[in-house]
Image (tube, helix red, strand yellow):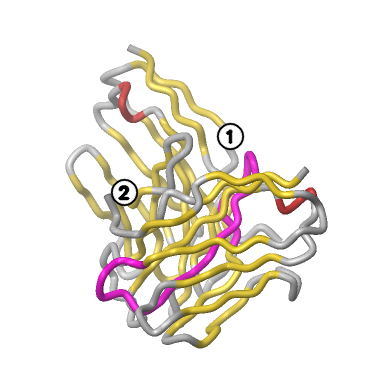
């Protein structure tokens, strides 16, 4: 149990639709990162939010966007869904000043299928 | 450009024997390395980590070795147990933040 919760756990969307995924970070963690894990691959960094501001972005198009709220929970929004967006979306929370300890915790993920 | 690579997609070992999972990286800015374990339909779970100032870190049955000159790290599991069967991801982090770069993963199967 990491204290990071994500919703929904599974969903199916149609190509062209929009989706919102949600994440509640572990208590005391002010940084949230989102990752996309396609089948058979490792997680790929989408972006990170620190104190409600985007703080780093991976190689994903602008139709991937996010929000972080004052309570440090977060949303990932994907517009104009494509079939290749089908993946497990993982949320990870961490302390901004990352120490050498085990300070990055993942939620169980949201499985998105685009048909 | 795959900065973290796990060249073995799968590994099968007998219960009680040693499991060795390997990982190579190319980015010299990586200063912190982590291993995650992942079961199907679950998120990755932190297993063990190592800072670039060390060459070994041990936690129970798990030991991670880091060879900075070779840009190589390995995870040793001794003795291996059937419950260790999972996908293992190597991940690396740069000094500047908490963004992780993952390898492709290695499916470990421990046979009873």
Residue B9 lies, with reference to residue A113, above or below; the image says above
Residue sitting nearer the eye, B1 or A48: A48
Q: Residue furthest left?
A: B60
B14 over A34 or under it: above or below:
above
Quadrant in which the C terminus of chain B is drawn: top left
Q: Does dot 1 land on a helix, a strand or a loop?
A: loop
Per the rendered image, the range of residues in magenta is: A25-44
Residue displayed at 53% across by 70% down:
A75
Per the image, is A43 magenta?
yes
Closer to the camera, B46 or B40? B40
Q: Quadrant of the N terminus of chain B?
A: bottom right
Image position of A43 with respect to A94: above or below: above
Q: Residues within 10 Å of mark 2 (few under 14, many from 20)?
A: some
Q: Could you give the CA–CA distance between mark 1 and mark 2, rounded to whole angstroms?
A: 19 Å
Classify residue B83 by image quadrant.
Answer: top left
x and y percent of residue B32 in the render?
Answer: 39, 67
Q: Quadrant of residue B27?
A: bottom right
Looking at the image, is mark 1 or mark 2 nearer the viewer?
A: 2
- Give me the residue at 42% from left, 71% from top: B31
- The percent coordinates of residue B6 (x first, y second) are 56, 45
Of the pair A73 and A54, the residue shown nearer to us: A73
Q: Is residue A87 left or right of residue B20?
A: right
Q: Mark 2 falls on what kind of element?
A: strand
Measured as percent of width and height from the top left, residue B98 is found at 43, 73
Residue wearing tag 2: B47
Where does label 1 land, which residue?
Answer: B9
The numbered dot on residue A95 is none
Question: Which residue is painted at 31% across and 74% down in the image?
Answer: A29
Q: Is residue A113 magenta?
A: no
């Amino acid at each position: 149990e990491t204290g990071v919760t994500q919703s929904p756990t599974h969903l199916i969307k149609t190509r062209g639709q929009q989706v919102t995924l949600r994440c509640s970070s572990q208590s005391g963690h002010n940084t949230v990162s989102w990752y996309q894990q396609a089948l058979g691959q490792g997680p790929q960094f989408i972006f990170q939010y620190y104190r409600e501001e985007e703080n780093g972005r991976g190689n994903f198009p602008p139709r991937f966007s996010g929000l972080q709220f004052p309570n440090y929970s977060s949303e990932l929004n994907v517009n104009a869904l494509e079939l290749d967006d089908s993946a497990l979306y993982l949320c990870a929370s961490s302390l901004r000043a990352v120490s050498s300890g085990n300070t990055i915790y993942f939620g169980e993920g949201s499985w998105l299928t685009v048909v | 450009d795959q900065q973290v690579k796990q060249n073995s997609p799968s590994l099968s070992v007998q219960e009680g024997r040693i499991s060795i999972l390997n990982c190579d990286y190319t980015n010299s800015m990586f200063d912190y390395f982590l291993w995650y374990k992942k079961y199907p339909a679950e998120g990755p779970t932190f297993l063990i980590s190592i800072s670039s100032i060390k060459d070994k870190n041990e936690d129970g049955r798990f030991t991670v070795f880091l060879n900075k000159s070779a840009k190589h790290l390995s995870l040793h599991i001794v003795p291996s147990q059937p419950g260790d069967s999972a996908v293992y991801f190597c991940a690396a982090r740069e000094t500047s933040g908490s963004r992780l770069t993952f390898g492709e993963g290695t499916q470990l199967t421990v046979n009873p």
